[in-house]
Image: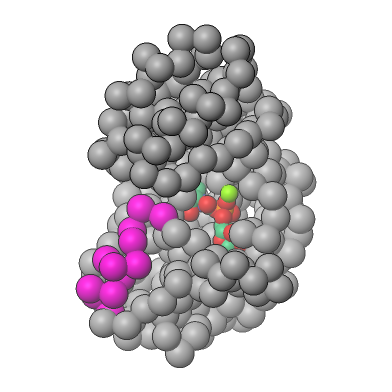
Amino acid sequence: EACRILQKGGLVAFPTETVYGLGGDAMYSEASAKIYAAKGRPSDNPLIIHIADMEHLDKIVEEVPEAAHKLAEAFWPGPLTMIMNKSDAVPHGTTGGLDTVAIRMPSDPIALELIRQGGGYVAAPSANTSGRPSPTTAQHVYEDQGKIPMILDGGAVTIGLESTIVDLTEEIPTILRPGYISLEMVQAVLGEAKMDKGLISSDSNIHPKAPGMKYRHYAPKAPVTVVTGPAEASARTIEQLAKPGDGVICFDEFADRFDQQTVECLGPSRDKRIQAQRVFDALRTFDSK
Ligand code: TXA
Ligand code: MG
């Protein structure tokens, strides 16, 4: 039934291993237009096309660079998105007007089956309302997208952060959005790769290349103060900043320092995998409290 909805140009939210996606037929501009409307997303912010089989890549790109073969071999299906020059088959309505296209092959079996039976090319941003934290459960999707025709519930996702985006249209492959797959992992496969200057530069005149990184994103309704640095030092800073009644998101080992606050634990400070799984959920949990 979900595939029929896609084939008729409708939207279906579905689980992937990273976050839930809001899917529509990528080759049909009107479906993409519905995605932008449902998310309240600026139409110059391009969508990722999800595929389920390598043979489907050729139709949507001008050519498949050697680096794409290597990265696909290493990380697909999985949490990696690659940017290549698009073919004429891909409507500009899906790419936010760009001549490049972002492509990912997810590993979640429900996602793969939906893509295969739903036409082969599913455009899907994270299923949150534009600007909100990404959804890691079907319930999160329902909070933001209660009006779409169908949400497939695959339980809580396993990774919990969006895919890493690598731009292969530059001379040196460039990470435009950090994610589960690190720069070092990409370098290990390709030899050479770098971070987008717009992500790491302290010069605010250098903008990120991925349009979505320019806009306010991952924002819960409540104001948030982010404390960065080594775990113990950060916990001490939070102790100084947190007022009674505030919400605190911290690592497990510091939870009992905050008896005047409501606490959401991110897992142990050493376990980044669990932290990734929990961070969006923690932000949303505070909103609902
Ligand atoms: O893990 C994920 O990637 C999830 C799941 C559903 O697959 N999808 C996702 O999509 O995070 P979305 O739309 O929330 O984020 C896509 C990002 C945006 O920052 C967008 O600007 C960037 O990818 N992007 C897409 N196409 C691009 C292109 N041709 N050039 C540069 N950036 C692009
Ligand atoms: Mg998103």
Q: Is residue 284 left or right of residue 234?
A: right
> Relative to 69, is 130 above or below?
above
> Can I make out residue 252 in this image?
yes
Q: Is residue 168 left or right of residue 45?
A: left
Instruction: Report which quarter residue 17 is drawn in.
Output: top left
Between 284 and 207, the one nearer to me in the picture? 207
Q: Is residue 118 left or right of residue 89?
A: left
Between 165 and 263, the one nearer to me in the picture? 263
> Relative to 131, is 283 above or below?
above
Q: Main secondary structure of the magenta part?
A: helix
Screen quadrant of the C terminus: top right
Give how far across and how far down residue 32 sits, in percent.
68, 55
In this rendering, the count of numbered labels is 0
**Residue at 76% of width from left, 59% of height from top?**
43
Give how far across and how far down residue 227 sits, in percent.
51, 40
**Residue at 26% of width from left, 38% of height from top?**
271
Q: Looking at this rendering, what residue extends furthest in the top direction?
A: 259
**Residue at 54% of width from left, 82% of height from top?**
85
Q: Looking at this rendering, what residue extends furthest in the bottom direction?
A: 171
Give how far across and how far down residue 70 sits, in percent.
27, 76
In this figure, which colouring scheme has been used for the structure? one colour
Instruction: Report which quarter residue 255 is drawn in.
Output: top left
The region drawn magenta spans 179-190
Instruction: Report which quarter residue 82 is drawn in.
Output: bottom left
On whether residue 198 falls in the magenta region, the answer is no
Between 283 and 100, the one nearer to me in the picture? 283
> Relative to 87, is 272 above or below?
above
Give how far across and how far down residue 231 sits, in percent.
36, 38
**Residue at 45% of width from left, 21% of height from top?**
264
